[in-house]
Structure formats: structure tokens, C-alpha cells
Amino acid sequence: MLRNRLVRLARLAAIGMVGVLLVVAYIEYWLARPVGSGPAGPSVNREPLAQVWSVKPILMLGIGDSVTAGLGAREPSHSYFNRLLKNPDDEFADMQGLCLSRVLPQIRSLNLAISGSTSLTHIEVLRERLPAQPNDVVGLVVITTGGNDIIHNYGRAAPKEGAMYGASLQQVKPWIANFENRLNEMLDLIDERFPGGCQIFLANIYDPTDGVGDGPSVGLPKWQDGLAIHAQYNRVIASCAERRVNVHLVDLHTQFLGHGSHCRQFWRATYQRDDPTFWFYENIEDPNDRGYDAIRRVFLRAIIDQGSSFK
């Protein structure tokens, strides 16, 4: 009798231990989203930024949504836009002196990005708030657009253009066509307002689910066609950049894979072993402070590739 009781107790203890391990594993690999600390994103080659590129007057223009506005950064100087322009006082050691004001001493900035805005607003902002520049001014333009078109209104209302969360792929086809027309018009307007020329750096849209497409992992409803619609938006952005010699794709989508809601799941192809951390702000649609560091680095590398265009 005693032996049977001990066996039962041992079995119950083993089951309890397995249960505890399963709970711990679930917390670690499905719920835990460590932010980490220190630099984030790719390294930047210091050599191209060692000397002045040009003394021409340059206008650095920001267009877009809260990503370019800087929502989620710990302080304004940590937004990707401001980090590109000037290193903050607490800059990481590997990025000290790596900013545009060092190589373009006559640069000034105008950030027209609006938190919460969609591409429908961005075209109007350009029409109404970007004046034609003098012939001797060269534009350096950074754009994030389209992300809010997709994620708004978070499944809380029926999908519509500019707030399509929950829509079917068939339903959004005309909205995607409109986005492509709108984006091309935006690029045309920027070209027109910079008669002295401009270089445009156009970001694609990242995915906080690391390519899984499970809305509930980021606190949103299920969305069957979400990934397919997201891919179509990024296809439009890439196509618009490819067709214009002065428009350059900035690939945030690839850079952020492995830093979303599944960042701890080592068995996924997107797992980033060197930095398996979460780069998104609490609202999920914007980056956190380290995410902005990564975005700054990806934009800066793209700008460096076109550095000769500013001479």
C-alpha cells in the first residue's frame, strides 16, 4: 500500500514538473519579449563619412507617419530622422561622428511626418506644406508610408481604404492600385518641388509578427489575408523605387524580421541569434528606442551608397 502511494506521488510530482516546464517554456518562447540594450541593427562603414561630401545647400525632408515622426523613441534626439541628422549626446561608440551634418555641413531639415497618418494624408501634406525649393537646393528625402493604411483601425471597425485591417485580398485590390497611384504622385510632387534635384529614400513596411501573420500575438484580431496584403503593399513600394533612378528602397522589412512577437523562438528561420530582442514600441506599430537605432543605420547605409549624388 505504501509503495503504491509513493509511486502515485512520484507520478504526480513528475506530471507537476512537466507542467511547470511547459509553463516556463510558454512564457519564455511565446510571451517573453526582451528589449535588450546597446546598439541595434547593422554596422555602418566609417570610411565614407570621414570627409565632407558637399557644401551645397541640402534640405533633408521627412514625409510619412509616426515612424518618421519618431513616436516610441525615448527622446526626440533618438528618432531615426534626428539621429541621421545629428548624433545625440549619448550616441553609441560605434556611431560617434557618423551623421549627415558631418558630411553635408549646409544641411537643414524639415520633418512633415504626422503620427497616425496614412498615405491619403501624406499626399495632401506634400501638396500643401512643401514649397518649391530654390534651384541650388538639393533634396534628401526620407519616407515611411503605407503601414497605417494596413494596420488601422486594428479590426475595430469595418475595413475601408486607409484603414483596411481585416479586409480580404479581393476587397483591397482597388485600394492597393490607389496606393500605387498615390505613391507615384507623391514622388512626382517631390521631384517638382526640388528643381535642383533630390534623392529619395523610401522605406518598405516591417511586420511585427516576424512573417507569421498571427495578429493575436500582437494583441490584434486574426486576419486571414493580412500577410498577403502586406506583401502587396511592399511590392508596390519596391516597384515604385525600381522605376526611378533617384528613388532608393530602404528594406526595413527584412531588417526587422526576428525582432517582433516571435523573437525568442529559436526554431524559426527569422531567429536572430546575435540579438533575439524585441524592437517594437508598446503600441506595436512603431519601433522602440533600439528599433529606431536600427532604422537609422539602414537608412544611413542606403544614403552612403548614394553619397556621390550630393557632390
Image (tube, rainbow, N blue to C red):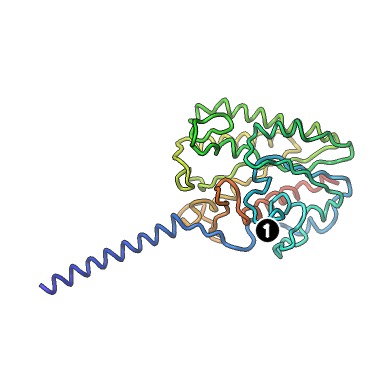
| Percent coordinates x, y for residue 173 in the rendering | 55, 27
| Percent coordinates x, y for residue 181 in the rendering | 66, 27
Residue 24 figure quarter: bottom left
Please state if 21 lies on the left or on the right of 135 as rendered.
left
- Outermost bottom residue: 2
Residue 285 vs residue 231, the one in the foreground: 285
Q: Alpha-carbon neighbours of circle 1 within 10 Å: few (<14), some, or many (≥20)? A: few
Q: Quadrant of the N terminus?
A: bottom left
Q: Is residue 9 above or below residue 131?
A: below
| Percent coordinates x, y for residue 14 in the rendering | 26, 66
Q: Secondary structure at mark 1?
A: loop
Q: Is residue 295 above or below residue 178?
A: below
Q: Which residue is mark 1?
A: 43
- Outermost top residue: 174
Q: Residue at x 35, y 63 (%)?
A: 21
* Residue type indicated by callout 1: Ser
Residue 275 vs residue 305, the one in the foreground: 275
Residue 130 figure quarter: top right
Res 140 seen here = yes
Res 266 seen here = no
Q: Is residue 29 above or below residue 141?
A: below
